[in-house]
Amino acid sequence: MNSDPLKSIKVGICGFGTVGGGTLSLIQTNGEEIARRLGRDITVSRIASRSLNVSEFATSGIHVGTDPFDVVNDPDVDIVVETLGGFEPAFEVVRQALANGKHVVTANKALIAERGNALFAVAKEKGVTLSFESSVAGGIPIIKALREGLAANKINWLAGIINGTGNFILTEMAEKQRQFDDVLRQAQELGYAEADPTFDVEGIDAAHKLTIMASIAFGIPLQFEKTYTEGISHIQPEDINYAQELGYRIKHLGIARISDKGIEMRVHPTLISRKRLLANVDGVGNAVLVNGNAVGSTLYSGPGAGAGATASAVVADIIDIGRHLVAGIAAPIVPALGYQRPHQDLSVMNIEDIESEYYLRITAKDVLGVMAKISRILQDYAISIEAIIQKEADSDSVPIVILTHSAVERQLNKAIAAIEELDDVVAAVTRIRVENFSD
Ligand code: HSE
């Protein structure tokens, strides 16, 4: 362990894309202020990347190579930063670093959400830290807030806009009537999107982040495979417009809730009243609303993607580990997922067992009696209607927009199937959940 007060803390970076590059740049730009905070310099001594121009680093004093295992096996490196992304070789790089007794900072939410249980076990056995603040909500210190700032609370629920790319797309579609594909391309150019942007638009990236937050909030193992995931690629401009007419905005939310029925973990497009702060978080912005039984609701917001925001969280983790080193403490004081004795008996609910309000858009023939048939079906399944709007007929079909009161999703799905069976209904029913976040 590097507890020599005169030695700088040595960092090795594996992967030098948007986040890795941003991390080096931030350490260099704010190095003096960070050293004042920490009482020690932080030096990037090694970088591994397959796509670097080595000559650019010739006079930097940084050893640059292509093999991340050279970083992990360098005895001088105290902290390994993993910004490779994906599973291979990232899993083995992180596992090997931990096994070598090195602390690791990762921005890799897929790795933590899907293989974190195994990696945290190695970190615990070796008495080293595996930090991951930057893996959720970019620059917002939400891991620290949930794990430390709110540690006195029982968390009831949390809900967040946790994918910057998706929020950027929905905002541009709503405000500038832009096309989905065009905005996605811009998000890629701006460095917001994942290497595979379907992770952003199909909700997988958000599900990774929600899995991590739910684990810390409720003290449960990471269970990505049980997180319900629905993307935004099927959202039509007309749904955004109808939602606006009804006083709502459509956001792609990750929601985790605990009740006596179990734990909900779900990612899907959601109508939120435009009076809620969460509905007004736009562009690449992320925000997480957390409800604790002592504090009530607290909101955390900020940039959710991009080099500077993500590096801010990576470097904060490096400083945190550095503070342990300066104090001569090897093993982390705070458990990685916040609990020394996690709950083993809390089960994750099936999506069909949740209760929610719903927005339905039904495309029907413009004929007498169709509205009555739809109302009858909803009544048969005990679903009560809060608002109903019949829009102008377009040639021979008419959009009918319905907001329901709270209903069990299984019942709603049965009602939708019955509505789609009607001869007068000419297209699949669009269903979007509605959330009010009353405490
Ligand atoms: N692709 C991610 C996003 C990057 O858009 O939020 C930050 O995790």
Image (cartoon, grey):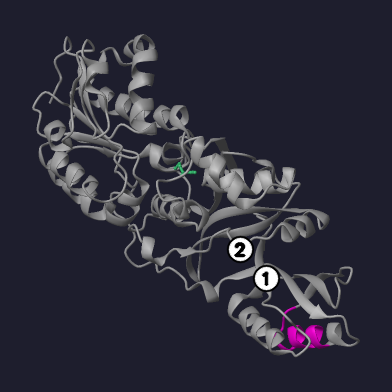
Q: Give amino acid for label 1.
A: Thr
Is residue 132 positioned above or below 54 on the image? below
Neighbor class of circle 2 (other Cα within 10 Å; few <14, some 14-19, many 20+) is: few
The tag on residue 53 is: none
Q: Give amino acid for label 2.
A: His
Q: Name the front one of labels 1 and 2.
A: 2
Q: Name the residue located 72 percent from the left edge and 48 percent from the top edge.
A: 174
For the N terminus, the image quarter is: top left
Report which quarter residue 52 is drawn in: top left
For the C terminus, the image quarter is: bottom right
Q: What predominant SS class does the magenta segment belong to?
A: helix
Mark nearer the N terminus (1 vs 2): 2
Q: Please say if the residues under marks 1 and 2 sit with CB atoms less than 8 Å apart.
A: yes
Separation (CA) of disc 1 from disc 2: 9 Å
Q: Which residue is mark 2?
A: 234
Is residue 66 positioned above or below 169 on the image? above
Neighbor class of circle 1 (other Cα within 10 Å; few <14, some 14-19, many 20+) is: some
Observer-nearest residue: 59 or 40?
Answer: 59
Asked whether residue 333 is in view, the answer is: no
Dot 2: element:
loop
